[in-house]
Amino acid sequence: MHEAPVFVHIQLGRKMSILLEGTPFVLLGDSAYGLTATLMKPYPDNGRLDETEKNFNRVSSQNR
């Protein structure tokens, strides 16, 4: 079971945008999550990522 579908159904998941609104903070998720204003996910690896996108994916993965 993957936690992405569960996250949207719990209280914290539903209130996340309200909790983080106006702050410089976001959550880091994996590619199973949808991109939102409060949740960042990696660039899809379609074989054409530039070095900046690859670096973002690597750093966000390490920090997740």
Image (tube, rainbow, N blue to C red):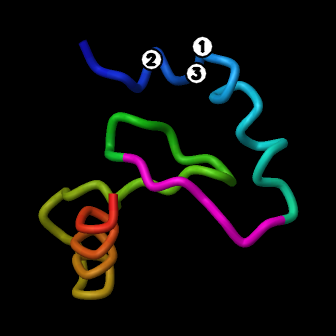
Q: Quadrant of residue 18?
A: top right
Q: Residues under labels 3 and 1: Cα distance?
A: 4 Å
Q: Which residue is mark 2?
A: 5
Q: Quadrant of residue 53?
A: bottom left
Q: Which residue is mark 1?
A: 9
How many other residues sit within 10 Å of disc 3, few (<14), some (14-19) or many (≥20)? some
Q: Residues under labels 1 and 2: Cα distance?
A: 7 Å
User: 63 or 29: nearer the eye?
Assistant: 63
Tag 3–tag 2 contact (CB < 8 Å):
yes
How many other residues sit within 10 Å of disc 1, few (<14), some (14-19) or many (≥20)? few
Left or right side of 17 for 54: left
Q: Name the spot of residue 62 as percent of width and height, x first.
A: 24, 67
Amino acid found under the numbered disc labelled 3: Val
Amino acid found under the numbered disc labelled 1: His
Span highlighted in magenta in the image: 23-29
User: 52 or 16: nearer the eye?
Assistant: 16
Residue 14 position (above or below residue 60): above
Amino acid found under the numbered disc labelled 2: Pro
Q: Which residue is mark 3?
A: 8
Please give the name of the residue rendered at 46% of the width and 15% of the height, measured from the top-left corner. Answer: 6
Please give the name of the residue rendered at 50% of the width and 56% of the height, measured from the top-left corner. Answer: 40
Asked if the magenta segment contains residue 28, the reply would be yes
Tag 1–tag 2 contact (CB < 8 Å):
yes
Left or right side of 55 for 47: left
Residue 39 position (above or below residue 63): above
How many other residues sit within 10 Å of disc 2, few (<14), some (14-19) or many (≥20)? few
User: 63 or 48: nearer the eye?
Assistant: 63
- Quadrant where the N terminus is found in the figure: top left
- Quadrant where the C terminus is found in the figure: bottom left
Asked if the magenta segment contains residue 26, the reply would be yes
Please give the name of the residue rendered at 84% of the width and 55% of the height, measured from the top-left corner. Answer: 21
